[in-house]
Amino acid sequence: MIPPETGERRAGGLKANLIERLHDPLQLRILLIGLVLAAGYGGIYMPLAAQIAETTAKLGRERKRAELARSLEQLQAQYRSFAKRLPRQADGKEWMQYVYEGIRKFPLKPCRLDCPPPKRLGPYQTVVLEIQLEGSLFDLDQFLRWLESNPRLIRVDEISIAPVKTKQQGKGKGEPDLDNMAMKLTVLGLAG
């Protein structure tokens, strides 16, 4: 019969068994690698985990800031490309005078030139001009081309062209004059 093992014998046997296993080079290497990894994780990574998370968050914020700076530089470059086309202190009267001088370059008859109150468009102010002209279709086309190729930033918002009705003697309405056209347009001018 085999005598029952006691706690001391079992502990001594486990210790002897462990020492015997450590004589095997492969098992010794595995144990040492495990101990080094556990010590590295517990002694290096655990204390630095909070700092790593904080540094990662800072890196994300700095990347967003760098992206914002790049997009700001692009917007500034775009603004510099058209900044010279924005008059600095232009009000409605100055815009009316400017457009009226443009109308005088063509054989057109200005019937109406109004300037409703200006409107805000982002950081810019837009001047609204309502214009009514009469003239030949060719001259009206030349005026529109002048507006399109203007050094200032001008946009034609609404336009309508119709023949002018001639008045007959004794009657209210006459035949349309196909050589003379009436054009109504709303122009938006961008000011700085």
Image: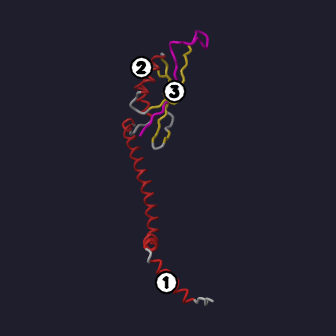
Q: Residues within 10 Å of mark 1 (few under 14, many from 20)?
A: few
Can you say whether 188 is above or below 1 in the image? Answer: above
Instruction: Identify the residue under disc 2.
Output: 106
- The answer to whether residue 123 is seen in the rendering is yes
x and y percent of residue 141 in the render? 46, 20
Is the C terminus in the top left, top right, bottom left or bottom right quadrant?
top left
Is the N terminus in the top left, top right, bottom left or bottom right quadrant?
bottom right
Contact flag, marks 3 and 2 (Cβ < 8 Å): no
x and y percent of residue 19 in the render? 46, 81
Q: Earlier in the sequence, mark 3 or mark 2?
A: 2
- For numbered disc 1, what is the local secondary structure? helix
Left or right side of 78 for 17: right
What's the residue type where badge 1 is placed? Answer: Ala
Instruction: Identify the residue under disc 3.
Output: 185
How far apart marks 3 and 2 lie (CA) works out to 16 Å
Can you say whether 104 is above or below 48 in the image? Answer: above
Occupied quadrant, residue 84:
top left
What residue range appears in magenta?
166-192
Q: Nearer the viewer, mark 2 or mark 1?
A: 1
Q: Residues within 10 Å of mark 2 (few under 14, many from 20)?
A: some
What's the residue type where badge 3 is placed? Answer: Leu
x and y percent of residue 18 in the render? 49, 80
**Where residue 16 is drawn, which disc sits there?**
1
What's the residue type where badge 2 is placed? Answer: Phe
How far apart marks 2 and 1 lie (CA) works out to 112 Å
